[in-house]
Amino acid sequence: MSRTLSVAQAKATFAACVRWAEDGEPIIISRHGKPVAALVQAADVEKLTRLRAAGPEGGLASLAGGWKGSEELARLVRRNRRSR
């Protein structure tokens, strides 16, 4: 579950927000009631970057990474032809 705080609330409780994010609880920051930013664990940013780079056409091979042997899996999947 994530918490939603206004910019002013996040500013006033920034250290606590960092602790919550560090513990795995995303903090959604809103301005005038609309979500504008999020404070998350650094590892989540790496995952998001990888997902964005993959795009909708990237397939499973583009998501491989982060565990031992995943590079080999990515190579094998890329080598196979796609079918409809």
Image: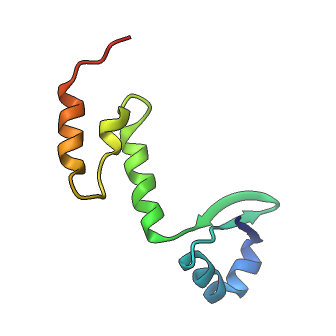
Q: What residue sits 70% from the left and 86% below the top?
A: 13
* Relative to 2, 65 lies left or right: left
Quarter location, residue 6: bottom right
Q: What residue sits 29% from the left and 58% below the top?
A: 67
Residue 11, compared with residue 62, is above or below; it is below
Q: What residue sits 61% from the left and 88% below the top?
A: 15
Q: Picture coordinates of residue 83 (x, y %)?
A: 33, 13
Residue 54, compared with residue 47, is above or below; it is above
In the rendered image, the quadrant that contains the C terminus is: top left
Q: How many marks?
A: 0
Which of these two is toward me, 1 or 51? Answer: 1
Quarter location, residue 23: bottom right
Residue 17, compared with residue 33, is above or below; it is below
- Farthest right residue? 33
In the rendered image, the quadrant that contains the N terminus is: bottom right
Residue 21, compared with residue 53, is above or below; it is below
Which of these two is toward me, 16 or 8? Answer: 16
Q: Picture coordinates of residue 30 (x, y %)?
A: 74, 64
- Farthest top residue? 84
Q: What residue sits 36% from the left and 43% below the top?
A: 53
Q: Picture coordinates of residue 21 (x, y %)?
A: 58, 75
Q: Picture coordinates of residue 31 (x, y %)?
A: 75, 63
How are the residues colored?
A: rainbow
